[in-house]
Image (tube, helix red, strand yellow):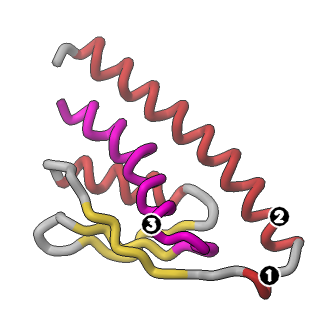
Amino acid sequence: MTLVNRIGRSMTLGLVFINELVRSSIAVARQVLGDSSQLKPAILAVPLDLRSRAGVTALANCVSLTPGTTSLHVSEDLSTLYVHVLDAPQPDAVVDSIKNTFETRIKEIEG
């Protein structure tokens, strides 16, 4: 993969992150200002397909910097990321969202 391709894909990841940041900020604000008794917090195991420590670190940082989610732990073999989610009424949808937004873009950068 050329440097130009890697920079382009990194910029795409940045745009995806900004989109998720805005969407999550609005969702968290609604949850905080609304009826918080309806929240369903959860700790989720996200299976990883990334190949490098740098990729896993980038994913964990993207997750932690997005409002409503926090990376808790990465398994020793780098196969699972544990994430705390403020509201996860459909846990599988949250895992799919993390994999389809951030992980997919990071895998593209890894090459």
Mark pair 2, 1: CA separation: 9 Å
Q: Residues within 10 Å of mark 2 (few under 14, many from 20)?
A: few
Q: Is residue 106 left or right of residue 67?
A: left
Q: Which residues are magenta?
A: 85-111
* Local secondary structure at mark 2: helix
Quarter of the image containing the C terminus?
Answer: top left
Q: Is residue 42 above or below residue 103?
A: below
Q: Is residue 82 magenta?
A: no
Above or below: residue 49 compared with residue 70:
above
In percent of the image, x 36 and y 24: which residue is there?
Answer: 9
x then y, percent, for residue 106:
32, 40
Residue 29 higher or lower than 36, as above or below? above
> In the figure, 87 relative to 11: above or below?
below
The CA span between labels 1 and 3 is 21 Å
Q: Is 98 in the magenta?
A: yes
In the drawing, what numbered circle is on residue 97?
Answer: none
Q: Which residue is mark 3?
A: 92
Residue corresponding to mark 1 = 36
Name which residue type carries label 2. Answer: Arg
Separation of residues labelled 3 and 2 (CA atoms) = 22 Å
Q: Residue at x 47, y 58 (%)?
A: 63
The residue that disc 2 covers is 30
Residue 45 drawn at (x, y percent): 34, 73
Q: Earlier in the sequence, mark 3 or mark 2?
A: 2
Task: Identify the residue at image location x=63%, y=73%.
Answer: 87
Q: Residue at x 48, y 53 (%)?
A: 97
Which badge, 2 or 1, is on the more N-terminal residue? Answer: 2
The three-letter code of the residue at mark 3 reads: Asp
- The quadrant of the rendering that contains the N terminus is top left
Closer to the eye: label 1 or 3: 3
